[in-house]
Image (tube, rainbow, N blue to C red):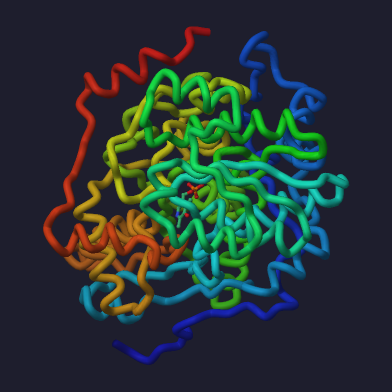
Amino acid sequence: MTEREIPYKIYLEEKDMPKQWYNVRADMENKPAPLLNAETREAMTAKELGVVFCDELVKQELNDTDRYIDIPQEIRDFYKMYRPAPLVRAYCLEEKLQTPAKIYYKFEGNNTSGSHKLNSAIAQAYYAKRQGLKGVTTETGAGQWGTALSMACSYLGLDCKVFMVKCSYEQKPFRREVMRTYGAGVTPSPSMDTEVGKKILAEHPGTKGSLGCAISEAVETALKSEGYRYVLGSVLNQVLLHQSIIGMETKLAMDQYGIKPDMIIGCAGGGSNLGGLISPFMGEKLRGEADYQFVAVEPASCPSLTRGVYAYDFCDTGMVCPMAKMYTLGSGFIPSPNHAGGLRYHGMNPVLSQLYHDGYMEACAVEQTAVFEAAEQFARVEGILPAPESSHAIKVAIDEAMRCKETGEEKTILFGLTGTGYFDMYAYEKFHNGKMEDYIPSDEDLQKGLAGIPKM
Ligand SMILES: *Cc1c(COP(=O)(O)O)cnc(C)c1O
């Protein structure tokens, strides 16, 4: 390897941290379709959304026109605890792979919650606090979002009620205890605390729950509790907006050294980290100023973009949330067990869905054993123990770097390393013991979920 002109880690200075989020919707010719009221099938008004969500967040959700939105000083102060996040040149991985490709990753795991989710958690908690609310409710699957929200709420002195999918509650006691350390109330879902929970328990005694069910319980609790609103860690356009801080910092750091990525890769669950990472680059592409290749990576077990349909669908099993037009496998789709809990959602953010539909972005699906192989390969040379979700992006970045080795292309690859995997050692254990399986749903399996998508 020749002289390293570009540092191993590019850290922006604190004073250079972005003061605004970038709203990619402003530059989209085809705007994402509006959320619909599930009963009337009319576009949700700000007033209707305000019953469930915080007022300022509703404004952000509906804002398709303002290109930049100021990040309040209080949120920036919190960001400074763990941001700017480093942009790392993966010199060690490049050397190991013997590839002419240049690989960069933006690392979002440098905080206790261990992922990018804190970027939106603090924003959502801040607006709830400023509205004078007492607290917020939410759901968590694997636990990353619940942890991030607990941290943000304790910092601001807000109450936080988390409905945690029962199987995770039992299997991931450490995540649960981190949330309780930050003062959150954690209830296994389904629970007897809500009507939805009681109904589900009566119909399916002994069920270990699902994300869709926990969402319904959290929404019901917010509606029943004076001074509470419901918050969500992905899928919504406001979350993608908050996550644009990832892409803006990355772009600033790259511009400082005159680096232009050819290919930008991110894992896609609900779409927020990928949407945030690509936002400013996508803006340039939409305005015709530059071109990039964008790749969304999803698990083969939950392939919303690659095998789903683009349609209005319910966001939760209880159908209490508004409907969104998105790539979806159907709200009744139950993904087979996969260790990347953060990627097990049936739908995809409406902005990303529209961009994908219009051909601005590509998508691919990868199997989990291959993902863990890539995770291990990465950990052994780069040091960081990656989250299974993030490792989906690593897998595709390595594949591309190996392809470059064959062709001799000196391509610049950028991927989002969304978090660390310390709470996923059970999954790593299965992988090491050769007990990990690759579940890929058959067309018939998918048909069941797709059949439940409402006819509009
Ligand atoms: C939640 C999570 C994801 C997926 O969520 P998106 O909204 O698609 O970004 C990815 N990586 C990690 C570490 C997560 O916790």
Specify whether 77 is left or right of 442.
right
421 shown above or below 184:
below
Outermost bottom residue: 3
409, 79: nearer the viewer: 79
Q: Find residue 123 and report its horizontal and vertical position in percent.
A: 72, 54
200, 147: nearer the viewer: 200
49 shown above or below 146:
above
> Across the whole image, how many numbered discs are drawn on residues?
0
271, 444: nearer the viewer: 444
Residue at 64% across, 10% down: 39
54 shown above or below 273:
above
Q: Which picture quadrant has residue 344?
A: top left
Res 349 visible: yes
Res 412 visible: no
Specify whether 338 is left or right of 34.
left
- The quarter of the picture where the N terminus appears is bottom left
Q: Find residue 197 and report its horizontal and vertical position in percent.
A: 53, 27
Residue at 71% across, 57% down: 153
Outermost left residue: 434
Q: Find residue 107 and report its horizontal and vertical position in percent.
A: 48, 69
Q: Find residue 439 and report its horizontal and vertical position in percent.
A: 20, 39
Residue at 52% across, 38% down: 352
Residue at 22% across, 68% down: 408
Specify whether 37 is left or right of 94.
right
Q: Which picture quadrant has residue 19?
A: bottom right
